[in-house]
Every structure is written in structure tokens, then in C-alpha cells.
């Protein structure tokens, strides 16, 4: 969850979508092309990620800069390192929607970077969006003085609820009583935000297990050639086999186990990072908890998928609850999980879920919070903090697939959503249509540049919702926001440290934090989300 390259480029007029017509304006400045897919990565509130310089020696930490030139087998496509477009040097405004399997994903780090925290929508599997380790809850090394480092296995032997907890490293607080977890996170937030505002008691979960609606597994094989699936071991690229995870959806884990068990009978080889041979690289499962819909994404090294129709048929027979199956092709030597090309093998190619009474269209690359139970609490508190009366003009910055803006539109006169990821904006437009909402417009643009453009043309807004990646916002964004003089700003943060930095700059611009509310979206990990209400002096 540290910093991400800034992939948000573009001017306000670029790729403007109107939920009433579904049409988009001239798109000269594209969305983010970074596939950072919640590969259990994505430093974000619970973001699993980091940076890896060698794709073999740096465990789950995303952003692999080293590459191998080994060719792929006959089923493979070009294995050259295709770079990402659209990254600027600014590390504060990035990652958020680059095809993330959860960005902001909870608690895990590694394999792919840049997912909202790397988060959002980053093709880093959360994030979001997800290898699970190296938590960045506190200081630059990943822990604050209030969040003590984990004791290594050599220093202390203990029975854990999870047999692979020390190797995985994603659930840093799993064996701590949940009330103690909340108490520890509360103290951390209070200390961090003491110069700016009070923090209300943390909102926790009744059942803090199996809450993740998005699950990613990396596939490999053991020394005997048997397929294995799981997560990367801390600080390595060795796969730790995982059968059941305490924070992942149980049905998703079951489907992954079924796929693993089918590989030999269909003569499908798992991908080998050293040789470049093999077909199956990753499996991503997304579930709509409210609707029961289930998406399976098979990430392959080649578009050639032998017996794919029979494979899909057999998988559906074993799991009739699956509503769509997608083949994603990633033939590059990269730590990113998702590639650019996809083929729908079964179903409609997306799932839907219900959040805060609204229905949302979710594709494989969409950012959608991984804990829907706590997300409802988070969004309802954010809208309450905004104090909407039905007369306000509202901006939803870093809007993703439009979740906050669409929920808020019921209480506002007009909502303007801005998001850099083009796929996310398309989903947002579709979501507005699904819900019959006509007072929302979505623009595909960099949030900071969009706000600058609005300020320069003298436009005024009453309330701004901002939900940036873990790397926080930018001074450019805050400068332009201050020029428009909204009475209230609601800041939703998955990175408390960057939030504190931004609150200091907001203060210089005439805005004071009034109150903070912590929401535990990521039990068993060191991460949480916090909402802060700011008022103009």
C-alpha cells in the first residue's frame, strides 16, 4: 500500500459518459491500461502488494521489474514484457482502478502491484484487490509502533487458526481476539488523527470470517508435477497451497479446489514461471453475496484452451451456482494477474450484486469492495456525514463503478462522478441505467485534472466525496477543490497515513476535519477504512 504510479491521465472532456444517454463524448485521453488485479496484492486497505524486482525471488510483492525471456509452449502467445501505458511519476494518485481484484483489497500483499493500493481495480489480484503479506499499516517498513511486528516462527511457536498463517502472512491479526483487533486499530487511528479530529469507536463485524467476496489463487505444481493452488509465501515466489482461508468466501475456495482437481483429467498444465510452459496461471472468483451470482475467471498464458467447452461443462455440473465463466489471457512475463484480452466461455460475462439498496454490474476488472457487509456501513456513514438535503450538487471523485455516487444520488440534486479507468466508467454508466437514476453523470478522467478544469470554468459544487487509492490524493486535486469552495468534503480512506498528510494540506486550504469514523473492512488484517468529514472554515 505504499505508492503507485499515477495512471490517471486525461482532461475533463475526455470520455464523458452520461447515464441518461449512455453515450460517451470524444475520448482522447484513455483510461488506465494497467492490469493490476487484486492478485492478493495491491497495497491498499488490506491491499496486498508491493514491488518485486525479481519475479522469482520477491514473493508476493507486485510490480515485477525483472523479466525472463523463456519461450512458452506451443499453446502460448508472445511472452515479451509489454509495459503499461499511462503511468506518471506521481505516486500519490495511482493504481486505483487498474483492473484490480480488489484494490484496496484487504490485508494481503504482493503478486501484483498497482491495485488500489493497487487497489482499486488494479489488475493486481483487491489488490480491492492479492498475495497477502507485508502489511503496511504503520511506518514505512509496514508497521506502526502501535501495530507490533509479527513474531516469526523461529521466535515463537503457537497454534494458529490457519495452518499456513506464518508462510502466507496475509492475516496478521488472525489469532488475536477480535475485540482486541478493534481496540488496536482504534488506538492507531486516534493517535494518527489526534492533531485533526476525534475518531468515533470502530465499527466491527458480528462474524469476522469468510467475508471476502473476491478470491484469487495462483496455480503452480509441486516437485511431482501435481497441481497446487494458493498464495505466495512471504518474500518469495513459492506457492503456499491453501485449501481453506479463514477470510475468503468458502464457496469460492471450494470452486478453486474443484478446478485444481480437474486439471489432470483434462491434461491441463499449470504455468511455470521459470520455463514459461503451461497454461493455467490464476483463478479469480467473484461472488455477489446478495444475489448469489458467481463469476469464475480462468487466467491462461495462451488463448488456446484445449477442450475448453468440455471443461466448462464439467465445472458447471459440479458447481451449478456458477453464473458466468471467463477466460482471461495473460501471455506476458509480468506480475500482473489479468491480461487485456478476455473471452466469455459461459454466461453474460459479469455478475450483479446489491449494495445499499442499489444493484451493481461487476466485471472481472471492476473495483468493488471485498467486504459488502461492512461496505454498507461505510457508505451509509459517508452519506450521513455529507448532510445531503436533496438540493446539493455533488462530485464523487475516484468513483470507480459509481457505488458511492449512485447511492448518494437518491439524496442529492445532481451527482458528477469522475474516474480514470474506462472499464469502470462503463460499468458506472450501466449501473445508473440499471437503477433508473437520471441525475448522475460520469466522466472518464483523472480526478485532479477534472477538478482543475471545473475550478477554471468557475463551476461550484456543494459536497465532494473522495475515495482515493491508498496513496492518497494530490495537492493539485485539493487546490482545485478549494477553489470551488464546497461546504463539505467527505474523505473515505483506506490509507490512514496518507489521509493524515492530506488533512494537513486541507487545513492550509481552509478546511478542518470535524469527525472521523473507522470501519473494519478487513478483519484479521492490520488494515481498516476511515471516513473523515471536513467543513470549510
Image (cartoon, helix red, strand yellow):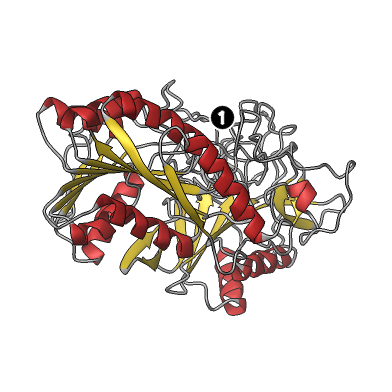
Image point (71%, 64%), residue name = 244
Query: Could you tell me residue 174's position as x and y percent?
Result: 70, 56
Looking at the image, residue 438 sits to the left or right of residue 432; the answer is: left
Q: Identify which residue, 377 or 287, lies in the foreground.
A: 377
Q: Can residue 311 be seen in this view?
A: yes
| Residue 389 quadrant | bottom left
* Vertical comparison of 94 with 493: above or below: above
| Residue 454 quadrant | top left
Instruction: Determine whether the residue tagged by mark 1 lies in a helix, strand or loop.
Output: loop
* Vertical comparison of 466 with 86: above or below: below
* Vertical comparison of 311 with 150: above or below: below
Q: How crowded is mark 1: few (under 14 residues within 10 Å), some or many (20 or more)?
A: some
Residue picked out by circle 1: 81
Query: Could you tell me residue 400's position as x and y percent?
Result: 35, 48
Query: Could you tell me residue 537's position as x and y percent?
Result: 23, 33
Q: Is residue 216 visible?
A: no
Looking at the image, residue 273 sits to the left or right of residue 359; the answer is: right
Q: How many labels does the image show?
A: 1
Look at the image and tell me in which quarter the N terminus lies.
top right
Image point (55%, 68%), residue name = 309
Amino acid at each position: 500500500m505504499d505508492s503507485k504510479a499515477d495512471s490517471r491521465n486525461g482532461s475533463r472532456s475526455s470520455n464523458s459518459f452520461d447515464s441518461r444517454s449512455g453515450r460517451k463524448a470524444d475520448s482522447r485521453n484513455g483510461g488506465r491500461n494497467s492490469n493490476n488485479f487484486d492478485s492478493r496484492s495491491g497495497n491498499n486497505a488490506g491491499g496486498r502488494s508491493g514491488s518485486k524486482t525479481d519475479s522469482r525471488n520477491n514473493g508476493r510483492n507486485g510490480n515485477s521489474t525483472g523479466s525472463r525471456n523463456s519461450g512458452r509452449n506451443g499453446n502460448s502467445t508472445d511472452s515479451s514484457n509489454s509495459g503499461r501505458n499511462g503511468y506518471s511519476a506521481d505516486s500519490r494518485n495511482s493504481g486505483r482502478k487498474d483492473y484490480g481484484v480488489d484494490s484496496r483489497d484487504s490485508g494481503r500483499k504482493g503478486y501484483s502491484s498497482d491495485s488500489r493500493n493497487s487497489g482499486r481495480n488494479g489488475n493486481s489480484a483487491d489488490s480491492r484487490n492479492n498475495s497477502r503479506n507485508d502489511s503496511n499499516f504503520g511506518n514505512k517498513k509496514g508497521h506502526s509502533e502501535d501495530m507490533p511486528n509479527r513474531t516469526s516462527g523461529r521466535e515463537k511457536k503457537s497454534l494458529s487458526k490457519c495452518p499456513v498463517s506464518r508462510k502466507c502472512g496475509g492475516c496478521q491479526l488472525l489469532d488475536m481476539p477480535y475485540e482486541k483487533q478493534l481496540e488496536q486499530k482504534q488506538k492507531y487511528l486516534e493517535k494518527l488523527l489526534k492533531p485533526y479530529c476525534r475518531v468515533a469507536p470502530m465499527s466491527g463485524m458480528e462474524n469476522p470470517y469468510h467475508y471476502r467476496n473476491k478470491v484469487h489463487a495462483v496455480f503452480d505444481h509441486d516437485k511431482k508435477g501435481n497441481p497446487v493452488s494458493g498464495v505466495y509465501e512471504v518474500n518469495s515466489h513459492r506457492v503456499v497451497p491453501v485449501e481453506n482461508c479463514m477470510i475468503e468466501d468458502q464457496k469460492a475456495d471450494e470452486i478453486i479446489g474443484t478446478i485444481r482437481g480437474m486439471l489432470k483429467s483434462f491434461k491441463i498444465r499449470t504455468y511455470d514461471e521459470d520455463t514459461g510452459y503451461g497454461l493455467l496461471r490464476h483463478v479469480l472468483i467473484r461472488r455477489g453475496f446478495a444475489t448469489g451470482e458467481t463469476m469464475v475467471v480462468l487466467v491462461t498464458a495462451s488463448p488456446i484452451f484445449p477442450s475448453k467447452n468440455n471443461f466448462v461443462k464439467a465445472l458447471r455440473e459440479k458447481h451449478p451456482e456458477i453464473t458466468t465463466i471467463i477466460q482471461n489471457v495473460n501471455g506476458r512475463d509480468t506480475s500482473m494477474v489479468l491480461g487485456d484480452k478476455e473471452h466469455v466461455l459461459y454466461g453474460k460475462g459479469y455478475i450483479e450484486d446489491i449494495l445499499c439498496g442499489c444493484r451493481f454490474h461487476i466485471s472481472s476488472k471492476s473495483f468493488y469492495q471485498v467486504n459488502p457487509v461492512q461496505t454498507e456501513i461505510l457508505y451509509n456513514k459517508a452519506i450521513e456525514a455529507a448532510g445531503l438535503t436533496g438540493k446539493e450538487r455533488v462530485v464523487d471523485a475516484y468513483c470507480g463503478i459509481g457505488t458511492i455516487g449512485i447511492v448518494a444520488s437518491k439524496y442529492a440534486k445532481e451527482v458528477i462522478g469522475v474516474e480514470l479507468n474506462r472499464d469502470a466508467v462503463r460499468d458506472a454508466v450501466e449501473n445508473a441505467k440499471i437503477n433508473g437514476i437520471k441525475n448522475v453523470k460520469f466522466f472518464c478522467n483523472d480526478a485532479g485534472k477534472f477538478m482543475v478544469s471545473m475550478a477554471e470554468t468557475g463551476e461550484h459544487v456543494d459536497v465532494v466525496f473522495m475515495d482515493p487509492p491508498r496513496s492518497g490524493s494530490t495537492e493539485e486535486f485539493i487546490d482545485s477543490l478549494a477553489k470551488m469552495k464546497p461546504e463539505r468534503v467527505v474523505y473515505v480512506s483506506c490509507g490512514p497515513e496518507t489521509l493524515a498528510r492530506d488533512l494537513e494540506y486541507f487545513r492550509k486550504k481552509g478546511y478542518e476535519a470535524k469527525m472521523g469514523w473507522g470501519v473494519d473492512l478487513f478483519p484479521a488484517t492490520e488494515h481498516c477504512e476511515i471516513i473523515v468529514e471536513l467543513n470549510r472554515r
